[in-house]
Image (cartoon, helix red, strand yellow):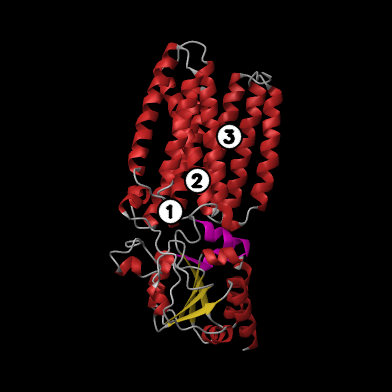
Amino acid sequence: MNVIGPTTEALGYLVAAVCFILALKGLSSPKTARQGNWLGAAGALLACVVVFLAEDLDHMGPILVAIAVGTAVGVPAARRVAMTQMPQLVALFNGVGGAAAALVAGLELNAGAGSASTTAAIAGAFTVLVGAVSFSGSCITFAKLQELMTTRPVVFPGGPVAFGACIVVAVGLAAGVVVDAREGDVNAGLLVLLGLVALAVGVLFVLPVGGADVPIVISLLNAFTGLTVAASGYVLDNTLLLVAGTLVGASGTILTRMMASAMGRSTVSILFGAFKGGSTAGSTEVSTRPVRSAGAEDVAILLAYARKVVIVPGYGLAVAQAQHTIHELVDVLQDKGVQVVYGIHPVAGRMPGHMNVLLAEANVPYDQLKEMDETNSELSSTDVALVVGANDVVNPAADSSPGSPIYGMPILHVGDAKAVVFLKRSMRPGFSGIENELLYDPKTTLLFGDAKDSLTKVVQSLKGL
């Protein structure tokens, strides 16, 4: 339309970039996360409006149809997705972003009028290659988390060789694209072949990852997408894409390192550990060893006569949608004079912040949420540690079993409490498939059943005491 001039366009992009930066700052705290979300959305909306007002766009019909279809699919999906499926949604959105960046860069290279600079040609080839890897890799992570395929590592003979060969071929094809782009005419067939090989690289990259490592790979692929968006910004000479992509790439990289640190492992061992048998995915067999179990009334009595209780929520709480019931339980205990806090592991649920958001839905006060180090310092003075649907983040094998796949992972030391109560559906191991010796400890009591049903019965019994 060319309604606004270059100065106004630049000012609009600057304001949008500031919104993105402030959004990241807001998302760093539960108290400001909602505000951060709104700022990010406002920045994205402003950026789109500026593009329509500043550029003389061709193909307006297909552009508007694409926006309408994306809105019709994306808005309901984001509003209806269950909290437990949030990592899958992130994976899908991340994959779509990578694919979009790859397609835009590919079309730009194919249409290139005149020779491109070496830097722009490299940026374009990089975007096609890494964008396609991000797309196919994200699709595999979605399938694993959604249990459309096995959640365990998929390793087959010759897999590492095939993976390495695909990388070499992809880099060679990308070099060919760069040479063609410098001469001004990139063959469409070469771009398609590069995209297909890159898709294979993404699949082979993620297949060997399983168990609790999958969410970490989602975060890494998110960083990949950010880098492709930044590179496509260079190809399209769009400063805002450069800024936004760099922010996403940097935040995704930081988050990946934080998650790997929370698991006590390096990113390299997470990605390629399965080739050496080092993945966190273990057995899925159900143990038949004897344990001490009790009813809801017994657990209620134990909690009612405690002075201090630490609740450790996990993925099972999220699956059961028991956040409101656990909040009610805490209110009842506090009315009886019991001191209660929540001990939150950095990767409780499946991703950092996942459990904080879930508990915020139930209006749990932020000052009741304690981070892992703070919780561990209090557990020795705790009468009862109530573990709800968590297994891996309290498994002492991380400290005591050098041969365990999760050895070295920081955990919540609930075994230091005077008594431990596990709410579990069955004796099946947790997401990483590692058996928890604490379940067989004499001080441990198990209450079997759906977390929401079990907590409801405990609350009812507490009210009757």
Q: Nearer the viewer, residue 126 or 376?
A: 126
Q: Amino acid at mark 2?
A: Ile
Assign the N terminus to one quadrant of the image.
Answer: top right
Label 3 packing within 10 angstroms: few (<14), some (14-19), many (20+): many
Question: Residue 411: x and y, percent?
Answer: 39, 66
User: Which of marks 3 and 2 precedes in the sequence?
Assistant: 3
Q: Earlier in the sequence, mark 2 or mark 1?
A: 2
Residue positioned most to the bottom: 465
Q: Nearer the viewer, mark 2 or mark 3?
A: 2
Residue 16's label in the rendered image is 3
Q: Amino acid at mark 3?
A: Ala
Look at the image and say whether residue 275 sits in the magenta stretch.
no
Residue 450, compared with residue 269, is above or below; it is below
The residue where tag 1 is placed is: 210
Q: Is residue 364 magenta?
A: yes
Instruction: Say which of 459 and 89 sits in front.
Output: 89
Query: What amino acid is at disc 1?
Result: Gly
Q: Which residue is mark 2?
A: 140
Question: What stretch of residues is rendered in magenta?
Answer: 353-371
Quarter the C terminus occupies: bottom right
